[in-house]
Amino acid sequence: MHLIGMVRVLHFEFVCRTMHIEPTVPHFRVFHQMHCTQGFYSFVQRASAKKILLHPPKSFHDWK
């Protein structure tokens, strides 16, 4: 699996666990689908999946 694909899986798991939802393959497949490019497997966002964060923050100045 390509590194970016693994990051997507780990991010999904992190978000699910912070929301107290069990991360499962069916839940993951709601947002992502498998994609193969040049022999590497990864995941891309499903066209029908809604984005959760429409305007990502550009910085976190007051994070402390």
Image (cartoon, rainbow, N blue to C red):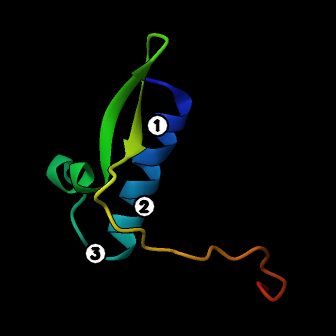
Viewer-closest of 29 and 48? 48
Q: Nearer the viewer, mark 2 or mark 1?
A: 1
Q: Amino acid at mark 1?
A: Met
**Residue 64, x across and y down, in percent:** 79, 86
Q: Residue 4, image x and y in percent?
A: 54, 36
- Give the residue at mark 3: 20
Q: Quadrant of residue 48?
A: bottom left
Is 23 on the left or on the right of 58, as rendered?
left
Mark 2 Cα shell of 10 Å, populated few (<14), some (14-19), many (≥20): some
In the displayed structure, 55 sits above or below 7; it is below
Distance of mark 2 from mark 1, alpha carbons? Answer: 12 Å
Quarter in which the N terminus is drawn: top left
Q: Residue at x 81, y 89 (%)?
A: 62
User: Which residue position holds label 1?
Assistant: 6
**What residue is at 77 percent from the left and 79 percent from the top?**
60
Q: Amino acid at mark 2?
A: Phe
